[in-house]
Amino acid sequence: MKVLIDPIAGKSAEIIETLMSSSDMVDDPALQFKLRLCIEEVVENIVNYAYKEGDGYIEVGTELKGDSLYITFRDSGVPFNPLEKADPDITLSAEKREVGGLGIFLCKQLMDRMEYEYRDGNNMLTMIKKVS
Amino acid sequence: MNVTINREENRFNVVLQGRLDTTNADQFQKDIQPLMEGDQPEITLDCTDMEYTSSQGLRMFLMLQKSVNARGGRMTMTGMKPQVKEVFDITGFSNIIRII
């Protein structure tokens, strides 16, 4: 499945549901919970931060390859590689922990693999999770 | 996310129901405002019916825990569903928030 949504301002919920209702989506509720969480984190990042001026598109996709589900996101916003972001130090006390920076970290922990590429003016992020 | 707060002096029994995500994090922040005031609060968050929390929700719980610590209080989360608990575990929040 591949769907282009343009423009994207205020459409987080629609984009998330588009992916969750894909025929490639898994039935297992526990796995669905994790996938939804990761999808939401990525979609919110793109909708809120990719297009600093004006608005733009997002193309989302799902594909089953072998035993894994590939979820893809493409936008032409500000170049941003979320995988370069430093992980939060999860051993710190509440006082020292910073509020925020958890979304991408959660994705990295819950997915098996994440890939990022900037190509032809597009951010291309892929999340990969074994589903069977 | 539905927030019900029962207060008895400095003791707050709070029932959280539903999903906490970007769409309602701002409202949630307003709803928990009563918990951000007063000395030595004893707060119990009943999470039995909390279905989901995104990183936006985690931010709120960390903010609340910081505020409670600064006021010499105590906060406990109870009844958390396993899939929600896992999110608290992998982000290290289980070490800074008391979860029973």
Image (tube, helix red, strand yellow):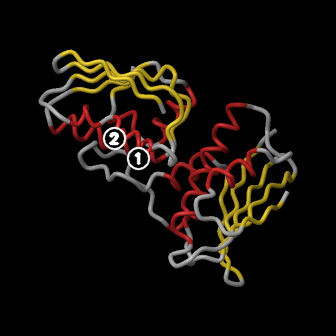
Q: Secondary structure at mark 1?
A: helix
- The amino acid beneath tag 2 is Lys
The residue positioned 68% from the left and 52% from the top of the image is: A14
Q: Examine the rendered structure and indicate whether residue B60 appears above or below residue A121.
A: above
Expressed as whole percent of the image width and height from the top left, the position of residue A87 reads 45, 57
The residue positioned 64% from the left and 74% from the top of the image is: A56
The residue positioned 53% from the left and 32% from the top of the image is: B84
Q: Secondary structure at mark 2?
A: helix
Q: Examine the rendered structure and indicate whether residue B62 appears above or below residue B9.
A: below
Crowding at label 2, few (<14), some or many (≥20) Cα neighbours within 10 Å? Answer: few
Q: Nearer the viewer, residue A11 or B12?
A: A11
- The amino acid beneath tag 1 is Asp
Q: Which mark is residue B26?
A: 1
Expressed as whole percent of the image width and height from the top left, the position of residue A3 reads 80, 62
Q: Judge from the rendering whether residue A2 lies leftward or rightward of residue B75; answer left or right.
A: right
C-alpha span from label 1 to label 2: 7 Å
**Placement of the C terminus of chain B among the 4 image quadrants:** top left
Q: Chain of mark 2?
A: B
Expressed as whole percent of the image width and height from the top left, the position of residue B8 reads 21, 15
Crowding at label 1, few (<14), some or many (≥20) Cα neighbours within 10 Å? Answer: some
Q: Judge from the rendering whether residue A123 lies leftward or rightward of residue A64; answer left or right.
A: left
Residue, disc 2: B30
Residue at the top extreme? B8
Expressed as whole percent of the image width and height from the top left, the position of residue B45 reads 36, 24
Q: Are marks 1 and 2 in contact (CB under 8 Å)?
A: yes
Q: Chain of mark 1?
A: B
Residue at the bottom extreme? A120
